[in-house]
Image (cartoon, grey):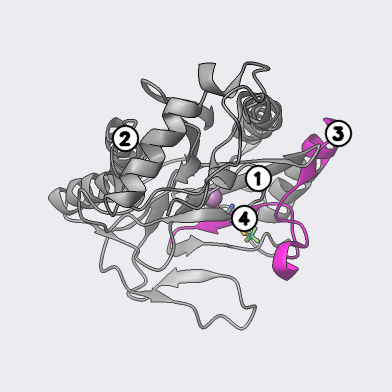
Amino acid sequence: MYDGDVELGRNDECWCGSGKKYKKCHLEFDEKLEALAEAGEDVPPRALLKTPTEIARIKESAQVNVGVLDHVAERIQAGVTTEEIDQWVHDCTVKHGAIPAPLDYEGFPKSVCTSVNEVVCHGIPSPDEVLQDGDIVNVDCSTILDGYFSDSSRMFCIGNVSEEKRRLVEVTKEAVQVGLVQVKPWGHLGDVGAAVNAFAKEHGYSVVREFGGHGIGLEFHEDPFVSFVTRAGTGPVLVPGLMFTIEPMINMGRHRIDMSDPNGWTVRTKDGQPSAQWEVQLVVTEDGYELISW
Ligand code: MF3
Ligand code: CO
């Protein structure tokens, strides 16, 4: 049985916070979920579906997150250390009354992830790491505001970046758009990963398998795990209210990664070739999706 099942009477107030009677609000919706679950579909539990009130609060968090990324975009350039980026992110987030979600998250020591060139993800800002002309860098910002989470990341090209690396950055950005096109209510999450993977392959690139997107909103990382190497028509149903990130890591060379860095965080490509990533946060709606953070 669908595990988001609610014990509500038809005349009780709906669980969504609308103030309407259940029968006039989400009763039909819940019956649809129940039927899908009975038909063998993987239906996200109720706890993962955001109410309009929650979405509004999460958007306030995202407003800070997007502002922090804009702040980084205005100042990032050759000669800057990734430690300086960390300070910008930390100070800008705190100034807005929010908390940088990475700080102390499972022991992560900084406020932001900065992943340069062959670093796939989870790069740790350092005063010894100076951005050089020709580098590509992912800056991954996540914010907690009043307990609500937002998360998005962008790539930055530092100075004169080779045509080859610039193309990787652009194609990865397009891959996110290609994934977003697949976000349709009552579709499948696997459609997103299938489209992203096919698009990356068409361009001669490969997609990292071990890391992906995730549910988000009331926690930093919620279910579902969002893989970008899925098959279409598989995985959880894209139920309105489901909120998650699309954040493929795309490698210029092979998909294999190296997680042996003694710091326990920094992930690199095994072949040493560059990797790129863009991340957006969205919520599934009745007629498509709404971007929450970018
Ligand atoms: N921001 C990353 C994500 O997109 C998670 C980083 S976890 C950290 O999911 F601890 F490294 F910050
Ligand atoms: Co994320």
Q: Earlier in the sequence, mark 2 or mark 4?
A: 4
Disc 3, SS: loop
Q: Position of residue 164 (x, y in %)?
A: 27, 49
Q: Is 248 contained in the magenta span?
A: no
Mark 3 → mark 1, Cα distance in angstroms: 14 Å
Disc 1, SS: strand
Given contact means CB atoms under 8 Å apart, are the residues at marks 3 and 2 in contact? no
Q: Which residue is mark 2?
A: 186
Q: Earlier in the sequence, mark 2 or mark 1?
A: 1
Name above or below for residue 283 compared with residue 82: above
Q: In the picture provided, is 15 more to the left or to the right than 194?
A: right
Q: Position of residue 106 (x, y in %)?
A: 71, 68
Q: Quadrant of residue 251?
A: bottom left
Q: Is 100 contained in the magenta span?
A: yes
Please state which of the two labelled residues, at mark 3 or mark 2, is closer to the viewer. Answer: 2
The CB of the residue at mark 1 lies under 8 Å from ligand 1: yes
Q: Which residue is mark 3?
A: 97
Question: Ligand 1 shows up in which quadrant of the image?
Answer: bottom right
Numbered circle sitting on residue 142: 1
Name above or below for residue 102 compared with residue 239: below
Q: Position of residue 285 (x, y in %)?
A: 43, 25
Task: Please give the name of the residue rendered at 17% of the width and 50% of the height, measured from the top-left corner.
Answer: 198
Q: Which residue is mark 4?
A: 113
The stretch in magenta equals 91-117
The CB of the residue at mark 4 lies under 8 Å from ligand 1: yes
For the residue marked with disc 4, what is the amino acid? Cys
